[in-house]
Image (cartoon, rainbow, N blue to C red):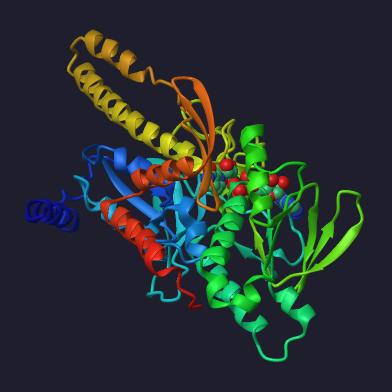
Amino acid sequence: IVTTGGVFYYITQRERNPGPQLPHDPSKKNVVVVGSGWGSTAFLKNLDTSEYNVTVISPRNFFLFTPLLPSVAVGTIAPNSILQPIRYLTRHKDRKITVIEAEAKSVDPIAKTITFADETEVQGEVSSTTIPFDYLIYAVGAETQTFGIPGVKEHACFMKEIQDAEKFKRRFMDCIESAGFPGQREEEIERLLHMVVVGGGPTGIEVSGELHDFLEDDLKFWYPELAQKIKITLIEALPSVLPMFSRELIDYTVSTFKESKIDILTGTMVKEVKEKTVVLQMPDKTIKEVPVGMVVWAGGNKARGVSIDLMSRLVDAQKNKRGITVDDHLRMAGTDGTIFAVGDCTSTQYAPTAQVASQQGAYIARMFKQLAKRDALLEQIMTVQKEGGSTESLEKQLTKVENLRPFHYSHQGSLAYIGSEKAIADLEFFHHKFSSGGVATFLFWRSAYMSTLFSLRNRVLVSTDWLKVKLFGRDLVR
Ligand code: NAD
């Protein structure tokens, strides 16, 4: 125990106290990274920073492990357990990486500048500025798609940022406590306890599953008279939920939800969200207004305003409004090859997932190693040419280095938690597909997430949260 404790202490102390870093080097190229999500952190993790001066710009100074957000929403996991300050990563690199907490406002792809602003509560005298870049890694992600449906922004709860999960928990508990208020009419109690989740993609499914667990494992004991009246309805416009999973796993999810008493309404479209009701267009095109306590909106993603502005500056090459068009090497179409776009802000043949963004970020970091070699060779060639020497062998090397391999996505599979300690997985091993669902898949789901968590600190915190919930249950505080 003492030895293990000693080793653990040594590792944590090394993580806490990164060594000194080299300063920025004016002779090196400046790389600006926008965002602190899956794409940018994968890039930063894999980048050889001795070759570049790096600046990270993001409106949040942390990385969020998005797959566990629905677990935070119901209090299975504490918010901070799935966050990791971005400086934790940048302080462990060779050369100093400058981190700026700010929101990117616009990118000028011709002048190669980026303008950003500090939009947080507290600001200093300077809160907006523009800086130049040699290379830009554009990884701003996406925002929630509402399709302009009235009332969604005002009355629904999203599930994208950490604040959304916290807001969800507060609202949900508020609905339950208000339902328990003395003298409440039966109809009003039913309304307050009707939870509607919109969107049958992985986010909507996971939120519904987690809500069901909260109800079964905790609320039934603490609110016995109310818990039996809580109703969860999942609404999906398409004929089926989870279109990215195999038919077998879709059926498994539907039957698990049936057992869990979660109603799934497919072919049903939400037309409006009001303060106390939601307006639905049913499969037979009739309109129905249903009383609700809370609506969770998991209707998918769309491009952010800053990305739309950037695309509009390169209108001939950027015709796809869903996201940034990139070439095989993830260079933004219409630019001179110095702007790279990764993750959910792009529009590619791949689904906008964490897996894709991470592989893209890591790919660009590898490519930057080659770009550094290319730039060094070009400089050498110029010097030799000035001196009148032969550049033949250098040019041969340059041809090799310039031969950049295109990005190739390797799909490891899809995983989703469906509640009742069951998960579904469509996996690929050595080009063979496997589908599985159930309790064993749930244990696999947990271990897969445990291994992809950002740091040792996150792993310790999340496993402690899981243990805490097993022993004491989820807390009911708002
Ligand atoms: P999504 O785009 O996968 O699903 C949104 C769903 O909402 C769609 O099926 C759409 O038909 C439905 N919808 C939209 N408007 C509607 C309306 N007005 N009425 C009824 N239904 C409506 O969104 P998501 O679940 O947030 O996922 C986004 C991306 O992130 C996907 O690529 C997904 O694969 C990925 N993701 C993966 C996981 C996982 O693998 N565990 C978890 C979360 C997200």
Name the quadrant of the N terminus.
bottom left
- Residue 95 pos. (x, y %): 20, 46
Q: Residue furthest bottom?
A: 183
Name the foreground residue: 268 vs 405: 268
- Residue 194 pos. (x, y %): 71, 69
Q: Residue at x 15, y 51 (%)?
A: 11
- Left or right: residue 56 versus residue 145 is left
Q: Residue at x 34, y 44 (%)?
A: 451
Task: Report the number of discs.
Answer: 0
Location of residue 360 by image quarter: top left
- Left or right: residue 217 versus residue 299 is left
Q: Residue at x 27, y 40 (%)?
A: 52
Q: Residue at x 69, y 71 (%)?
A: 229
Compared with 129, 124 (above or below) is: below
- Residue 314 pos. (x, y %): 60, 39
Confirm whether residue 160 shows in the render.
Answer: yes
Confirm whether residue 61 shows in the render.
Answer: no
Name the foreground residue: 88 vs 173: 173
Name the foreground residue: 427 vs 49: 427
